[in-house]
Image (cartoon, coloured by chain):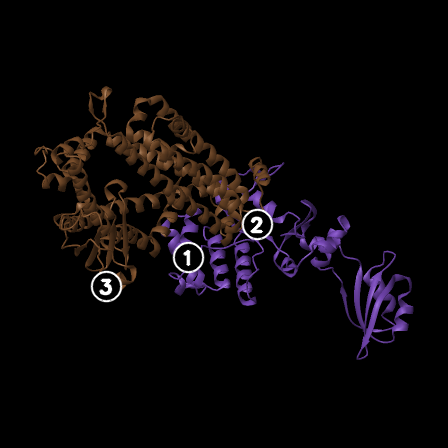
Chain colours: A purple, B brown
Amino acid sequence: MLVGANGAGKTTLIRIITRITGPDSGRVLLDGHAMTDADVARMGYLPEERGLYKKMKVGEQALYLARLKGMDKADASKKLKDWFERWDLAGWWNKKVEELSKGMQQKVQFITTVLHGPKLLILDEPFSGFDPINAELIRGEILRLRNDGVTIMLSTHSMPSVEEMCDHIALIDKSRVVLHGNVKEIRRRYATDTYKLEFRGHKVAFADALAYHGEILEHKEEDGITTARVKLLHGAKLNNVLGATIHAVDYIGAHEEVPRMHDIFIRAVSETTPEAITSGMTE
Amino acid sequence: MNKIRLIIWREFITRVRKPSFLIMTILGPLLIVGAIMATVFLAMQEKGPQTIYIHDAAHLFTNKLTPNEKLGITYYYSYDDLSDSAFKASPYTMMIHLNEKIITNDQAQVFYKDMPSQHVQNYVSKDLEKVLRQAKLALDSVDVNSYDRYSQPLKFELYDIDKGGKRSYDQVKAGLGFAFGYLIFIFIFVYGVQVMRGVMEEKQNRIVEVLVSSVSPFQLMMGKIVGIAMVGLTQFLLWIAITSVLSSVGMGMAKDRMADLASAQMPGQATVQLQQEIGATTDPNEASEDAQDMKMVFDLWDELPVARIVGLFLFYFLGGYLLYSSLLAAIGAAVDAESDTQQFMFPITIPLMVGIFIAQTAVYNPDGPAVFWSSIIPFTSPVVMMIRVATGNAFEHPWELALSMVLLVAAFIGTTWLAGRIYRTGILMYGKKVSWKELGKWLFYRG
């Protein structure tokens, strides 16, 4: 997963990887070796700025794009027909692209990106332009490809998808990597030792019992149930807090507040460039 | 290489399959031939009979003019003037005042109700001239036969001593060369602009980034240029085929009509008529005009190195197209909308316009220095050199021809390289108003 504010350099990085643009310095390694034409042929790239020839027929165009990727005609034709069947596009094969809805065009584009069985799939904002149903279709397809062993590089602003789909994340800002690593690991790293505790009982008694183990950041009471956000202090563990307060109140639940990627994203960028928050963050 | 073939094929087939291509290919020659024939027939069409009132103040013309049945011309003579209002009220369609001193001032005033056709005007004017000339000759007691002998035009025949004293048709050949040059000029424009539009379409569609992840921008650009060149050549060949069929039919019909009119004693060929009338001493063996034309065509065919000319035509045709279309491709890549192309189109059109201008002068002076330089410089040579090729001048200076050809190849390699560099940066650049300075920077981007 590649994330970053507008203008951070995501698309430029992708274009360098796909060899569309040359780097000013540095080089791209794939499996430890410098990239070759053969490597590029084994990539699939769905750019953010994508489109099709409007006047060309759908099937003919898909076939053309597949053959440009090096597939032979018969193979490409067979695989395309399978995909079109599976994604309810079969009746559109001989229609012109301009007759398709935007969502259908996006589907065709996705198909032509993955048709040649790439080992590395680079998707730049793959969900833009899809309704929720088709976005789910694409998401399912991406996960299926991941399970089949395809390496997928996803560039997006849509943070919820990050957490669900990705193993690794790289956050870039002004063409530098500011944060990268395993998603779970990063969320843990950015955890602030804050817990959400839910209990029945008197909140003053709770506060007294809590004493120096933690600080109540906020609390609210609803239908006799108090929810308190507590930040642990002085190296205390959840167990210490529970131990100290369990006699004072009846616990219903306790969850650690792990920060969402969205918050981490904003924090990481604001630490390096505070103005980025106001100038260009989009979601 | 396989990919570039695919691109060429797509560019070719999508254009050739368009209804507009078929329509233009079939309609183009029909329109050309049709327009020519329509003009000819319309010009021949007469509005109706012409009854002409001749005011013969000098008493020279009465009963000497020749009415024409085909053109519907009849003359009515009078020594008296007719007032304007009387003419308007009269059934006469034209009124011609021939003044007393017409012998010296050569003036005739023609009044009409409906503008007479060019044919009627020509006929009447020649008819009057003929009678006036006879009157002048009689006045000076000059024998008509003698006069005719004196006034025979000089046949100014050109022979090139280096070509074994054979009859030279340099003017005709230069005209032929100009036609070739003009065709190249049109081709460069029409198809070069198609390249530019094609590039802009890919950019506006946003398909270009998908494409350049599979093929290099240079392959994409060259594929488009070559594909469209093939469309142009195909259309061109079809036009030649269709036009030659149509025009042979059309010419046949036109000739019949011409023959009709000629039999109506068109004074258009006044000398012939005069000669017949006065039994002039024409050489009975002298070929008719038509036969002379045929002789010239055969002579030219024998004389012209047709294979070499066609070869060079194709060379300059493609060379010029490659040179300009790569530049136009670069423009298409650099801009976002067609309206932004103006500032870049202008400097590209200028040399072509200069080329066609010089080519026009070259028809009359194929050896001039302007023609020499513009046939060497690659930006004008595709248009101008064809004239030197057609007149044979280029073959007399093989080094100049070779230099021109080498420079053209070098230039299109240069412009394609240049265009390639602008193209690969431009196609992925959106929403930026591009200046010349900006284009200059793109040339030196790495990648």
State the SS at label 1: loop
Q: Residue sitting at 27 percent across and 57 percent down?
A: B112
Res. A55 mark: 1
**Residue matched to label 2:** B430
Check disc 1 and give the amino acid type.
Answer: Lys
Q: Is residue B216 visible?
A: no
Residue B323: x percent and y percent? 43, 36
Which one is nearer the viewer's eye here, B92 or A29?
B92
Check disc 2 and give the amino acid type.
Answer: Tyr
Tags 2 and 3 touching, CB below 8 Å = no
**Residue matched to label 3:** B90
Toward which corner of the image does residue A248 lie, by quadrant?
Answer: bottom right
Res. B369 mark: none
Left or right: where B320 falls relative to B25: right
Same chain assignment for discs 3 and 1:
no
Residue A61: x percent and y percent? 41, 54
Dot 3, how many residues are within 10 Å of its Cα: few (below 14), some (14-19), or many (20+)? few
Same chain assignment for discs 2 and 1:
no
